[in-house]
Image (spheres, grey):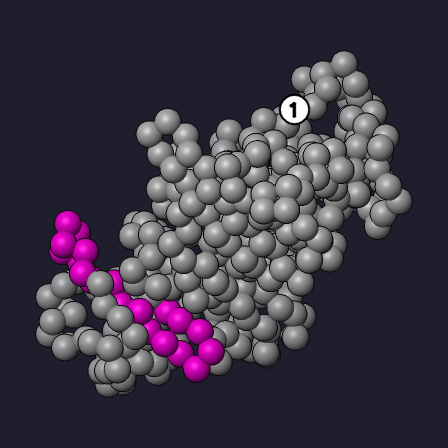
């Protein structure tokens, strides 16, 4: 099962040539700077743009193929789209906006009550859109898209117009959405924090072309990726709660084939989550130091080193048994330690420096 999009289309001054294939179900995140072509991918997938050449398929069902002359119209593709602005009907209540998605929908798995509960909008049903916060409006827009019974949910930078507080309000609902329904999701963003919380598969786009795609845990920690160039670059790893140590106020997690200690979590043993480990929180050593407070000392092997001349720093990609870490060190330290591909190292990580994402 996969999401497959390939198209070529010329706009004045730029030609987009995009080819991507990602496994489904799960959340595929398109990441790249403004103007790189992310929203054009959405338009092609939803049938809102008819490129010069294209082939679009969702789980083997072909929706567009210029070679054979096939083009399924947007209203028959069963793709729910959520835009940056909620686009709710101002004269309808929240409940009637939600029911609008059911008008032409075939029978499906998404029931009104379940969607309302998942998105936490039960108390809003009698209100009009102008009385809602930005985060509430986006939750209603997502609910309306789900109730159209889509085979694929597409979200085009749905949090871009929200301030930090509203983003923090809605991100947990998006995280619940990706785990509660067995539904493929394509999510467009240029915000690294949204990538870390939501992506299963990451697709990196630059100047109208896909430059890399693959599991988030691999691409987020690549020293040569656009994410690594961000000031808050970090590795993101799937994790599982192994054991709690209440006497030490610590929880042991398995991540990347290693055990990490983090401050005590209110989560049951066996629960699956993910951890974000900022590159700036990792110290690289050649041998185990004595008499330090750092409790996570993780062996690995250097996979690559990319120098950031402007910042006089180096990004070091470290391979674990089942994952990757990314460390930011000074260029001088990289030279002094002779960091190069194949060199065994130890990654020293403070427990309080590891961010646990529910």
Identify residue for label 1.
87
**Position in image of residue 48 (x %, y %):** 61, 31
**Position in image of residue 212 (x %, y %):** 41, 58
Magenta residues, as a range? 307-325
At x 60% / y 62%, what residue is drawn? 23
Q: Which one is in front, 157 or 194?
A: 157
Split into 4 quadrants, where in the image is the C terminus? bottom right
* Circle 1 SS class: loop
**Position in image of residue 302 (x %, y %):** 28, 76
Residue 178 is at least partly visible in this image: no
In the visual, does 14 lie left or right of 26?
Answer: left
In the visual, does 327 lie left or right of 74?
Answer: left
> In terms of image quadrants, where is residue 319?
bottom left
Split into 4 quadrants, where in the image is the N terminus? bottom right
Q: With respect to residue 134, does 145 lie above or below?
A: below
In the visual, does 323 lie left or right of 231?
Answer: right
Q: Which one is in front, 334 or 151?
A: 151
> In terms of image quadrants, where is residue 103?
top right
**Position in image of residue 136 (x %, y %):** 66, 31
- View extreme (front): residue: 68
At x 42% / y 34%, what residue is drawn? 10
At x 14% / y 77%, what residue is drawn? 338
């Amino acid at each position: 099962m996969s999401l497959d999009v390939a198209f070529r289309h010329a706009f004045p001054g730029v030609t987009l040539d995009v080819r991507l294939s990602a496994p489904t179900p799960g959340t595929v995140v398109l990441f790249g700077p403004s103007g790189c072509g992310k929203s054009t991918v959405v338009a092609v997938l939803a049938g809102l743009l008819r490129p010069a050449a294209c082939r679009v398929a969702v789980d083997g069902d072909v929706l567009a193929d210029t070679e054979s002359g096939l083009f399924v119209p947007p209203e028959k593709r069963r793709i729910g789209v959520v835009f940056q602005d909620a686009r709710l009907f101002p004269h309808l209540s929240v409940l009637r906006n939600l029911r609008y998605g059911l008008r032409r929908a075939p029978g499906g798995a998404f029931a009104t009550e379940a969607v309302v509960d998942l998105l936490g909008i039960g108390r809003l049903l009698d209100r009009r859109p102008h009385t809602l916060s930005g985060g509430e409006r986006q939750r209603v827009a997502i609910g309306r898209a789900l109730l159209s019974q889509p085979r694929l949910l597409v979200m085009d930078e749905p949090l871009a117009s929200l301030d930090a507080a509203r983003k923090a309000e809605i991100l947990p609902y998006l995280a619940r959405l990706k785990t509660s329904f067995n539904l493929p999701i394509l999510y467009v963003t240029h915000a690294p924090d949204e990538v870390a919380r939501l992506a299963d598969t990451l697709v990196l786009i630059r100047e109208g072309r896909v430059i890399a795609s693959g599991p988030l845990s691999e691409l987020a920690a690549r020293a040569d990726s656009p994410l690594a160039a961000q000031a808050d670059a970090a590795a993101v790893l799937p994790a599982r709660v192994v054991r709690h140590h209440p006497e030490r106020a610590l929880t042991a997690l398995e991540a990347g084939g290693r055990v990490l200690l983090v401050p005590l979590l209110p989560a049951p043993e066996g629960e699956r989550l993910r951890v974000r480990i900022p590159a700036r929180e990792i110290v690289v050593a050649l041998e185990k130091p004595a008499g330090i407070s750092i409790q996570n000392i993780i062996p690995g092997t250097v996979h690559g080193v990319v120098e950031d001349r402007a910042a006089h720093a180096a990004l070091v990609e470290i391979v674990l048994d089942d994952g990757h870490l990314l460390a930011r060190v000074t260029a001088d330290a990289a030279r002094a330690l002779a960091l190069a591909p194949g060199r065994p190292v130890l990654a020293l990580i403070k427990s309080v420096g590891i961010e646990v994402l529910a």
